[in-house]
Amino acid sequence: MIAASPAVGRVRVLIVDDSAVVRDMLTKELARDPKLEVVGAAPDPFVARDMIVRLKPDVLTLDVEMPRMDGISFLRKLMQHYPMPVVIFSSLTNRGGELALEAIDAGAVEVMCKPGSAYDVGDLYVELIDKVKAASRVSVTRRNVPVTAPSAPARLSLARTTHKIVAMGASTGGTQALQDVLTALPANAPGIVIVQHMPEHFTRSFAERLNALCEIEVKEAEDGDTVAPGRALIAPGNYHMLLQRSGAVYRVGIRSGPLVSRHRPSVNVLFKSAAQYAGRNAVGVLLTGMGNDGAEGLKAMRDQGAETIAQDEASSVVFGMPKAAIELGGATYVSPLNLVPQKVLELAAR
C-alpha cells in the first residue's frame, strides 16, 4: 500500500532512538508543529537504514547511545553513503559534551540534550522543533561538509592591543563558523564574549577544543569573569550571559531565567547588555543561525554607536539570524565569513 503524500512544504522527520517512550514522546512533540511530519520511528540504526531508503526523510533525529551500533558510528556511515541533515538528541553528560563535539565532526547539524525524564520536556520541544526546521535547510555533502564559505585565512595580526569589546552570536552552523573566526585572531585580539546556542555540557568541551586551536584563550564563562584582550568567553549552555562594567573593567554575569527569543542563552540578552555598557566601545558580530535571535540586540548596539557585522547569505549555513538583523537595520557591514576576522580587527583598532 502506498502512503498518501505529505502536505507540500512539510519537513519529513525520522526518529531514531532505542527507547519506545522517547520515540513516542518525540513523535507527539514534533507533531505540535504543522510544518513537521514524523514519517517513522526506528529503535536502532539497522532498522533506520532501511526506513531512510524507503521513506526518504528530510531530517533525522538520532540518539548516541544505542544497542547494536552507536549513533556516531551510524552517523559516519550515513554521511558517506546517504548524507542528510541530522539532529543529535541524546543524554549528554560531561562525557557526552565530548561526544557532542564528535557528533558535530561526524556530520550532525545540531545537538540537543535529552531531559532527565522523557516526560520532563518543558521548553525543550520548542527548541527541538526549531532545530529540526533549521536542519532541514542545511545542504549536507558526503563526508559531512555543510555548504559554507572557504575556511578562514591564516592567523592575522593586530598592531596594538585594544580594549574594545567584541560581542558575537551564532546558532546553526556556528560551531564551525566560530572556529574559523577565532583561530584567525592574534593573541592580542580584543576581549570577546560569545553566545552560541548549545546545550549544557557542550559549551565547556567546545571552549576547551577552541582553546587548544587558538592563540587567544577560550573558556566557558563563569560569573564575574573579566573580559580582557586575548580572551574569549563562551556563555555556558542553559544560562544567559550579560556584559557588565565596573569602572574601566568589563566582566560577565551568568544568569538563569526564562527563554529570550526562544533561547537560553540568548544572543539578544548579550547584545543588549553590550549596547548598554560598552556602546561605541563595542563591535557586534552576528553569524549563521535560524530565527531572529540577536537581530534586535545588534540594532541596539548600532544605535549606541557600535560597529556591527552580519555574516552574508552565501557563507551562512542558515541565513535567518543575520538576515533578520540586516532587515532591521542592525548591520553596519555584511561580510562573508572568511573576511570577518580581518573586519573585526580593523573595527577594533579604530
Image (cartoon, rainbow, N blue to C red):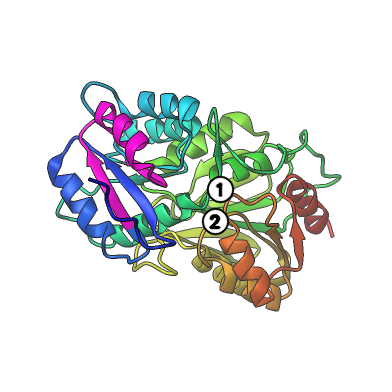
| Badge 2 element | loop
Residue 40: within the magenta?
yes
Q: Earlier in the sequence, mark 2 or mark 1?
A: 1
Residue 60's place in the image compared with 286, above or below, is above
Near-viewer residue (198 or 217):
198
Whether residue 278 appears in this view of the structure is no
Q: What stretch of residues is rendered in magenta?
A: 37-61
Q: Give the left or right position of residue 56, taking residue 152 as reference.
A: left
Residues at discs 2 and 1 in contact (Cβ within 8 Å): yes
The image quadrant of residue 133 is bottom left
Real-space Cα distance between discs 2 and 1?
7 Å
Task: Identify the residue shown where x is 60% and y is 58%.
Answer: 319
Residue 21's place in the image compared with 223, above or below, is above
Question: What residue did someone put label 1 on?
Answer: 174
Task: Identify the residue shown where x is 25% and y is 45%.
Answer: 40
Question: What residue did someone put label 2 on?
Answer: 289
